[in-house]
């Protein structure tokens, strides 16, 4: 099972539709759940409050991958391999996206692996779609199925 924990809801209809499409595609390969925690507007409180909310949804035996700008960069093939190997020993992968202000250090410390898609900063709602697409691509690779490059 894969859980994605992220602050905030997707507000734009076109992004909601994209997320729904990738969730539908992914359902062929794995059970997937998106957990949305409330995003905080107040910078001084945001990281701590969002971090506490995120950690409530993580179990002790979950394998946690945080998406962080300073994390490890992987190709799509390497991400597929990482997911495949992790699922062999731990059936629960939790991917954690930060909110507008990033991730609280308590969440980063709980992480088993820090992953970065780029040195660039992306809007977290759009990044959720990018993550879902890369997960779909990973499962296509794992299953030796064609997918555009």
Image (cartoon, helix red, strand yellow):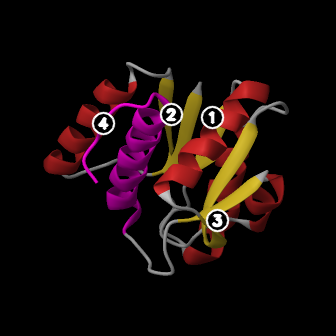
Instruction: Look at the picture and state if 42 lies above or below 137.
Output: below
At x 46%, y 41%, the residue is: 138
Which mark is first along the chain, 4 or 1?
1
Cα distance in 3D space between marks 1 and 4: 17 Å
Q: Does the magenta stretch include residue 136?
A: yes
Q: Where is residue 11 in the image (x, y as percent from the top left)?
A: 25, 51
Who is closer to the viewer here, 84 or 64? 84
Q: Mark 3 points at which residue?
A: 103
At x 57%, y 34%, the residue is: 3
Q: Residues within 10 Å of mark 4 (few under 14, many from 20)?
A: few
Q: Give the range drawn in magenta.
A: 123-149
Say whether residue 74 is left or right of residue 39. right
Marks 1 & 2, CB-CB < 8 Å contact:
yes
Q: Does the magenta stretch include residue 130?
A: yes
Comparing labels 1 and 3, the label whose residue is closer to the camera: 1
Cα distance in 3D space between marks 2 and 4: 11 Å
Which mark is first along the chain, 3 or 1?
1
Marks 1 & 4, CB-CB < 8 Å contact:
no
Say whether residue 134 is left or right of residue 72. left
Who is closer to the viewer here, 10 or 114? 114
Q: Mark 2 points at which residue?
A: 142
């Amino acid at each position: 099972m894969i859980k994605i924990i992220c602050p905030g809801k997707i507000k734009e209809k076109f992004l909601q539709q994209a997320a729904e499409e990738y969730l539908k595609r992914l359902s062929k390969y794995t059970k997937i759940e998106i957990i949305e925690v409330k995003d905080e507007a107040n910078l001084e409180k945001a990281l701590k409050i969002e971090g506490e909310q995120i950690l409530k949804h993580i179990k002790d035996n979950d394998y946690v991958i945080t998406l962080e700008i300073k994390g490890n960069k992987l190709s799509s093939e390497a991400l597929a391999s990482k997911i495949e190997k992790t699922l062999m020993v731990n059936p629960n992968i939790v991917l954690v996206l930060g909110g507008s202000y990033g991730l609280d250090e308590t969440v980063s410390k709980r992480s088993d692996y820090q992953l970065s898609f780029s040195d660039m900063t992306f809007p977290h709602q759009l990044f959720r779609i990018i993550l879902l697409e890369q997960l779909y691509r990973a499962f296509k690779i794992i299953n030796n199925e064609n997918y555009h490059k």
